[in-house]
Amino acid sequence: MVSLLKKPFFSSLQTLTLQRLTRTLSYVSGERRSSETNSSFIHPTAIVHPNAVIDQDVTIGPFCTVGSMVRIGKACKLYPGSHIFGDTEIGEQCTLMTCLPGVIVCFRTVSGSGAIVGEDIPGRTTIGCNNIIGHHAVVGVKCQDMKYKPGSDCFLDVGDNNEIREYTSIHRSSKPSDRTVIGDNNLIMGSCHIAHDCKLGNNIILANNTLLAGHVVVGDYAHSAGAVVVHQFCHLGSHSFIGGGSVVSQDVPKYMMVTGDRADLRGLNLEGLRRRGFSSEEVTGMRRAYQKIFMPVDGKLGGIEDRLAEVEQTRELAMLDVVRSMVESIRDSFEQDRRGICKFKHWSGSCSSS
């Protein structure tokens, strides 16, 4: 009988405890510490190092931990069980939400259950304002690169207005001369992984279980569907779309769509271009350029460089900035130390990556 009652009893107790802690933080968020010169509130059960820098109107709830090198910006809220460690800066009006055991998060943010910010290793995590970090996210910790030398500085920079959802992991750089970077206004959905030295731009959407290996570069407004795997050092161009379940082992040029294992080019990301307000003239020009490069009627045109040159020599296409940008994106992928572009389909149905 005891064994039958034990599990539901403690489960209910845990739920009730969390509910009470959440209500406690909501209640104390309007309170002020009369003994301090600023207007912050720190719950008696929180452990805050005396060297930590706490700005005005900060609320630190029950069972939180704040390390000695932490800087917390104005009007931040740490919900019960949030933890901030290492050389970590938190921007203004950020929120770290309820934390459960076994999770790590870093920076100026809004964090969810199980979030821990920063880690006591050399280097720094810097996070902008109004970020949200979800339950059990792991952000700003040591990379998983075997080439990392213990004791080396490693860095993570995160911009503003990012939403980083539950179970996501984001690692610091693998060496002092590099850094992992995430821009502004990105949505990183649940269980994504962003490895060391990745560079993400702005307004990106990574759907659930998108996994980026080290040194991946993602351009502005790129969008992945779920369960995407990207090989290290690949570039995902601006306004590109990666179909669900794709394995991307080479670059995806700007404005294009890929899908499959291994991922093939499937044309332009027309829906994404429409949503971003590209004009009909620009889209028509990009479609003509795409056809000339990847679907040539004349089989005598030769390799990829010949086709790119033909587009550049077509006056009405060369006049369009988007076409020039697309051509440059493709050409850059064949530079030294780059991986080339994803395979593309001729309209004969054969595949080639030239």
Image (cartoon, rainbow, N blue to C red):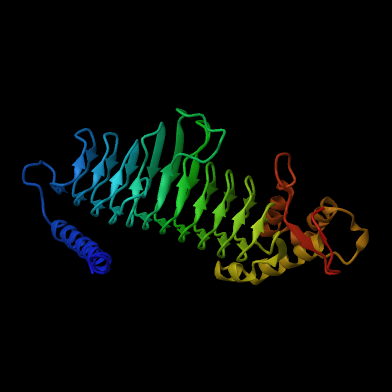
As rendered, which of 312 and 11 lies closer to the eye?
11
Q: Is residue 68 above or below residue 31?
A: above
Q: Residue furthest left?
A: 34
- Horizontal placement of 230 versus 123: left or right? right
Q: Nearer the viewer, residue 90 or 318?
A: 90
Q: Quadrant of the N terminus?
A: bottom left
Quarter of the rendering containing residue 314: bottom right
Residue 188 position, x and y percent, is 47, 58
Quadrant hosting residue 264: bottom right
The residue sitting at 79% across, 58% down in the picture is 311
- Residue in the image at 6% along x and 42% along y: 35
* 237 left or right of 4 in image: right
Front residue (pair 98, 126):
98
Q: Nearer the viewer, residue 65 or 339?
A: 65
Is residue 322 left or right of 293 when viewed as pictured?
Answer: left
Give the farthest residue toward the right: 300
